[in-house]
Amino acid sequence: MSRLNNGDAFPPLTLDTVLDGALSVTHHLSGHYGVVLMYRGSWCPYCNAQLSAFARAKPKLDELGIRVVAMSIDNNAEAATLVEKHRLNFPIGYRVDADKISAATGAYVNDSPRYLQSTGFVLDPSEKVITAVYSSGAIGRLVPEDVMGFVGYVKSKA
């Protein structure tokens, strides 16, 4: 397992999503700045807060051309309940294989129970990583204000 570095191409991942069916992450994000969030599960209060914040920020993210995708090992029912409860307005992948995602991205995995730790990536419009945030525990994650400021900065230097 190796971590993704700035400039690395984001790996091709296809997710089953609550509202959008099967979704290719890179195809969905292609041509836009992208945020890929891996969250621990619908039971995690920090994850709920993060996902809700991205949902509330969607109008501003849209203005900046930023798309968001999130994923966890939650089953379809758990993910659907999370989407409804927090009015999540971006694709939410469910039932991902924690070990396969970890092998592809370097995300930390909790041993027992098995789930992905919080991990976030910001991608440029060519699906290359421009920042990665890896957490080995509950805290340490991307927030929409930081993403919007960072993308604004990157665009100003382009």
Image (cartoon, helix red, strand yellow):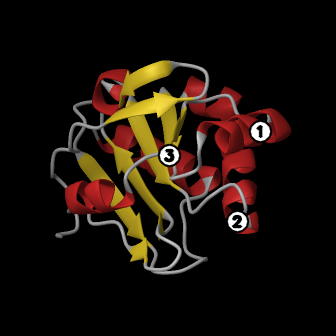
Image height check: is 111 above or below 142? below
Task: Tell me: residue 55, above or below residue 65.
Answer: below
Q: Nearer the viewer, residue 149 or 92?
A: 92
Q: Earlier in the sequence, mark 1 or mark 3?
A: 3
Inspect the image, locate mark 1, and give the three-letter code of the amino acid beneath it: Thr
Q: Is residue 42 left or right of residue 148?
A: right
Task: In the rendered structure, find residue 96 and report the number of the disc placed on it.
Answer: none
Q: Which residue lies at the image location 70% right of the left edge and 66% below the top edge?
A: 46
Q: Residue furthest right?
A: 85
Which part of the image, by quadrant, shows the C terminus?
A: top left
Vertical placement of 65 versus 156: above or below?
Answer: above
Camera-side residue of 42 and 76: 76
54 lies above or below 17: below
Q: Mark 3 = which residue? A: 71
Q: Are marks 2 and 1 in contact (CB under 8 Å)?
A: no
- Left-right relation of 85 to 37: right
Which residue carries the number 2 mark? 44
Distance between the alpha carbons at the discs numbered 2 and 1: 14 Å
Left or right: where 32 falls relative to 115? left
Q: Find the distance from the CA under tag 2 to the CA under tag 3.
A: 13 Å
- Residue tagged by mark 1? 81
Within-10-Å neighbours for mark 3: few <14, some 14–19, many 20+: many
The residue under label 2 is which amino acid type? Cys
- Nearer-the-camera pick, 19 or 34: 19
Comparing 106 with 7, the one in front is: 106
